[in-house]
Image: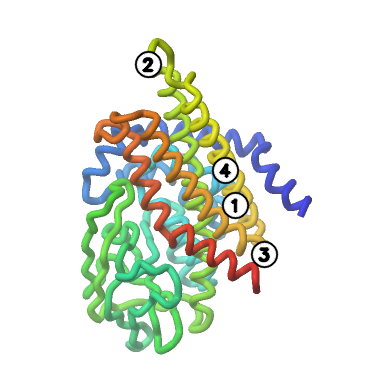
Amino acid sequence: MQANTASAASLLLSDEREEFRRSVRGFLARVSPESEVRRLMATAVGYDPDTWRSAAQQLALQGLAIPERYGGGGFGFNELVIVFEEMGRVLFPAPFFSTVALAANALLLAGDEDVQRELLPQIAAGETIATLALTEDAGRWDERGISLSARRSGADYRLYGHKNYVLDGHTADVVLVVARVAEAIRILAVDGDARGLQRTQLVTMDDTRKQARLEFDGTIARPIGTSGGGWEIISRTLDRAAVALAAEAAGGAARCLEMATEYADERVQFGRPIGSFQAIKHKCANLLIEAESAKSAAYYAGWAAAENVEELAVAAPLAKSYCCEAFLHAAAENIQIHGGIGVTWEHPAQLYFKRAKTSELLLGTPSQHRELLAQRLTI
């Protein structure tokens, strides 16, 4: 365990990774200031195509953890954690989580070489937006929540049913649908413009992360991978996505802490900054502890994902539950410290609270991830 801890801690000490962080932060500062986030929130697609292409062309972000043989950078989850952390700080409005954390990971883990050679280079180049369609009306992220059926049609399948709360499902070029074939779970690829597919954008709390309902009426879908082990692939994909979401939440919590402390230094009441009052000091101190702990949890889980070690099964649900709760608490306390202005539309604090609340539910609630953690610890 000591060796593992040292390896995870080294993430914070790497000069190369900190230089990479500065590059990512600088890029996001240019392309995703608050004004741009608000502009894109009001659009139907929710992202800027030019920015999406720039992310691929200038920093190769979409292909960062995709192997070089598929046109990617060949880096690992350690670097990807930094990207998600920085994106969480600015609420980057783009289909990055759906494409990279969900779809690309599912493709890599499915082991279908033909599909990988077709889709992964397009994702890495910023030419294709992809997503994973798993949840249905109940919003469950487990195997029991899947009822969408697929029937064989020659070499392909036809889908009948619907998926709900699909991240970027209304704009994705490729949708990886998790469906039931007889009693087995399979991953099937559907083109975004396929016949029999109806896509409806949902009205949600967080406009920086779009969701959609997808309805399938005999829609043609291509099978990915073999007929066995479908849920195992999805489970491993969700673990890696949980790590990415934890890193994003850690970045959001850190930014809420910065906003709160900056305001506490500037806001004067009774002739002195409110940050000098004991109650505000306690709030800020607690937020600092939670934000730093969230970063540590996310980084350790990122190391476990990068090394593909057994600890990932424990680190992923632990990091997701802790980091998302820390983010939500930081966002709520940030509003409390700001007072009435924090809940106004004009102030960014409410944007972080909405992202934090939706992140708490995404991939399953913290309590569900703690239950998953307990189950895995007893196996």
Graded by Cα atoms within 10 Å as few (under 14), some (14 to 19) or many (20 or more), the crowding at tag 4 reads many
Q: Which mark is residue 295?
A: 4
249 or 276, which is in the foreground? 276
Mark toward the viewer: 4 or 1: 4
Q: Amino acid at mark 2?
A: Gln
User: Does residue 308 appear left or right of residue 317 in this picture?
Assistant: right
Q: Are marks 2 and 4 in contact (CB under 8 Å)?
A: no
Q: Earlier in the sequence, mark 1 or mark 3?
A: 1
**Taking 352 as reference, is 275 left or right?**
right
Q: Is residue 84 visible?
A: no
Residue tagged by mark 2?
Answer: 269
Q: CA distance from mark 2 to mark 4?
A: 33 Å
Looking at the figure, which quarter contains the C terminus?
Answer: bottom right
What's under tag 1, amino acid-wise?
A: Gly
3 up-or-down from 371: above or below: above
User: Does residue 71 appear left or right of residue 166 in this picture?
Assistant: right
Taking the spot 25% from the left edge, 75% from the top edge, the residue there is 216
Distance from disc 1 to disc 2, alpha carbons, whole Å, reads: 43 Å
Look at mark 3 in the image and give the residue it sits on. 310
Mark 3 or mark 4: whose residue is earlier in sequence: 4
